[in-house]
Amino acid sequence: MKREAPLKVTIALIPLAMALCVLGICRGEVATVLAKAINICMECIGLG
């Protein structure tokens, strides 16, 4: 089996993923994601 195509796709998608992460950070979505994660954890564990 050739593994060249998946490797090329992976290498091509890494800059896109990094750019989207930076875009999310610039838009201030880190706080939103953290708040949602805390709420989900509190609901699942039952501490809230």
Image (cartoon, grey):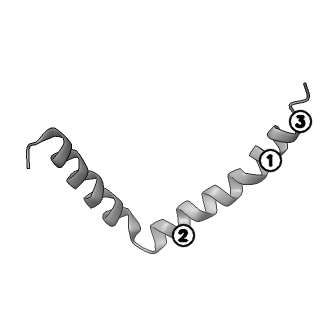
Q: Is residue 29 left or right of residue 2?
A: left
Query: Callout 1: few (<14), some (14-19), or many (20+) C-alpha neighbours within 10 Å?
Result: few
Q: Residue furthest left?
A: 48
Q: Disc 1 vs disc 2: Cβ atoms closer than 8 Å?
A: no
Where residue 35 appears, x then y in whole percent?
A: 26, 60
Q: Give the residue number, with chain letter if any, for mark 3.
A: 4
**Can you say whether 27 is above or below 48 in the image?**
below
Q: Residue at x 38, y 63 (%)?
A: 30
Q: Position of residue 3 (x, y in %)?
A: 86, 31
The amino acid type of the residue labelled 2 equals Leu
Identified by mark 3, the residue type is Glu
- The residue lying at 87 percent from left, 40 percent from top is 5
Q: Could you tell me which residue is drawn at 24 percent across and 50 percent down? A: 40
* Residue that extends furthest to the top in the rendered view of this protein: 1
Q: In what element is the residue under mark 2?
A: helix
Task: Report x, y in % for residue 44.
Answer: 20, 42
Mark before the other along the chain sequence, 3 or 2: 3
Marks counted in the figure total: 3
Residue under pointer 2: 23
Which mark identifies residue 9? 1
